[in-house]
Image (cartoon, helix red, strand yellow):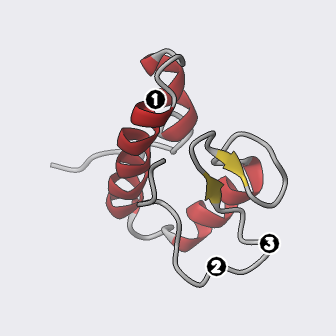
Amino acid sequence: MTRGAEAPGRRDGEHVPVTPDWTCGSCGDEWPCATKRHHLLSEYQVDRASLSVYLGSCLAAATQDLRSVPVTALQDRFIGWVPRGSRTI
């Protein structure tokens, strides 16, 4: 079981992942569920790079637990939904 994604002292309703299945501890959907995605976008609204790093670490941990799930499906699930901003040079 991978433990890195669970925050210590979590509270009910925070929509945290339950490993090794990577389901939402609040609603039971695949994590990150729609509610958690909304919360993450709000929390990281000015720092999408940090959001990507966080979700990338969750993706890496999930690939160890969910070996039967295709990697592309996990990529879509964990980071594919994050909006991409325009880059400035």
Q: Amino acid at mark 3?
A: Gly
The reply to whether callout 3 and callout 2 are in contact (CB within 8 Å) is no
Residue 57 percent coordinates (x, y): 35, 50
- Residue underneath mark 2: 10
Determine the residue positioned at 61% across, 69% down.
Answer: 42
What is the secondary structure assignment of the residue under circle 2?
loop
Q: CA distance from mark 1 to mark 3?
A: 25 Å
Task: Specify few, some or many for label 1: CA neighbours under 10 Å numbering under 14, 14-19, or 20 or more.
Answer: some
Q: Amino acid at mark 1?
A: Gln
- Residue at image x 46%, y 18%? 72
* Pointer 1 residue: 75
- Residue tagged by mark 3? 13
**Disc 1, disc 2: CB below 8 Å?**
no
Q: Residue at x 54, y 19 (%)?
A: 69
Q: Earlier in the sequence, mark 1 or mark 3?
A: 3
Q: Is residue 67 above or below residue 5?
A: above
Which is nearer the eye, 4 or 83?
A: 4
